[in-house]
Image (cartoon, rainbow, N blue to C red):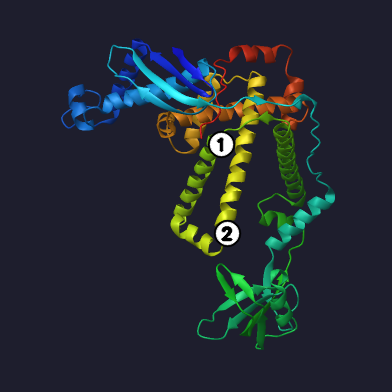
Amino acid sequence: MAELISREGNKVEFKVSVPAAEVNRMYDQVWAGLARDVRVPGFRPGKAPRKVIEGRVGKGYVEQEVRDRLLQTHYPQGARDLKLNLVDATIDPQNLASGQSFDFTVRGETYPEVKLGDWRGASVTAAAPEITDEVLGRTLADLQERNATFESVERPIEASDQVTIQEQGEDGGTYPIYLDVAEEHVRAALLGKQKGDTVEITVPAHQHGDHEHPEHTVTVTVQDVKTKQLQELNDDFAKSLNFEGIDKLRTDLRGELERRAQQEGDNARREEFVTALVDGMTVDIPQALLDRRREAMLEEIKDDLGRQGVKWGEYETFMKEQDKLDEFMADLAKNAETRVRRDLALEQLAEDLNVQVSDLEFNQTMSALAQANNLTPEQLSSQLGPNGLNSYYISLMREKGLQQALTSLGAGSQDEQAEKTEQPAGEGAAEEQSTAHPENQPAGE
């Protein structure tokens, strides 16, 4: 049960009380999991006394686990019940004990008021690219190129050849060059030469990373010249790609191209609509909200650099030396504002449409996400935490609202339009009535 305590401007405080029966159920669930997973010498699985299990997992572990699970469930539920759009929140849990209700207080800030323009009058014109015979032909030609073979020849080098060269000097090595994709100064130097020739390649001045390289000359020897051999577009070529024949290859390839084209069209319509939605929106965004998103994005960048073995301090120093740090931070702030505006528009759209996500929908998507990451739903919930779960719930709301809006405009995907056409009268209303817990809370930062 959630109770609003105070609301002043965009600051809000509410209390959630979890019934004793729910607390006891969670205790039983945690103990059951420990009895199943914790192995105690001298006891069969599931038969060790709770006191003995507690000694192995540590005093206070059970209470902490129960508390975390209750918060993961009832914090987002309380926010949904009170229809609060929380930017972020601080949770203050009270004492927890078996057989007693569990109370906790939430203090946070709500999102600003958002007013959307008349999006129902929007015209979404983006379309899927047409897959013509010419497009199919180019794709088949690309397959030929990617499956080409090379055979050595004794003649001057031509534009589509593969040329093996040996670079002279201490740091030189032997490597192939594909002339059809080589840089112009390399092509110009090698065209017309033959196996055994020594060639000087003039490399123009260029910048690589943080180093400026002046114009210089590289001396190489042509070791081998190979000509490109394209396979004919016939049954043998198709079978080399594991197709029954060339007709099957053409049919399947066209189907795949059409699928990708449809996806490209769907994405283009989504972006066209969202851009119009954001452009027509009226909102006064608090600077604190923009700063929070910018900091979150910066942390993501730091994590990405860390995974590549690059320390943020080193990268920051490099940008300062290149006089690019201010530009980087300005771009980061701009992108943060773009994301915040987009999120606010989609969240308001879902609220205006009274979008609902049922517990069944939420649990099914959580299970699928957990499985994709080789986790159990419980492990995923624990990793996300209360704010993360609430953010994920809101992401489902945004997506569902966007799909509903696009479908109402006749701008959804072909599959969605087909489902809408084939749906019996009244089925949509029944689905709406079966959903529960309307969620208006935007994703946490």
Outermost residue toward the left in this view: 42
Residue for point 56% across, 62% down:
323
Residue 90: mark: none
Q: Which residue is mark 1?
A: 287
Where residue 321 appears, as percent x and y from the top left, is 52, 64
Where residue 129 appears, as percent x and y from the top left, is 79, 44
Q: Nearer the viewer, mark 2 or mark 1?
A: 1
**Dot 2 amino acid type:** Lys
**Dot 1 amino acid type:** Gln
Q: Quadrant of residue 120?
A: top right
Secondary element under disc 2, as helix, strand or loop, is loop
User: Quadrant location of the N terminus?
Assistant: top left
Residue for point 73% across, 18% down:
423
Q: Nearer the viewer, residue 250 or 31?
A: 31
Outermost residue toward the front in this view: 8
Q: Nearer the viewer, residue 125 or 434?
A: 125
Task: Report crowding for label 1: few under 14, some 14 to 19, many 20 or more residues within 10 A (C-alpha).
Answer: few
Q: Is residue 319 above or below residue 425?
A: below
Where residue 146 appears, as percent x and y from the top left, is 68, 61
Residue 324: mark: 2
C-alpha span from label 2 to label 1: 24 Å
Side (left or right) of 385 relative to 393: left
Where residue 419 appears, as percent x and y from the top left, is 72, 24
Q: Is residue 382 visible?
A: yes
Q: Quadrant of residue 381?
A: top left
Q: Nearer the viewer, residue 321 or 88?
A: 321
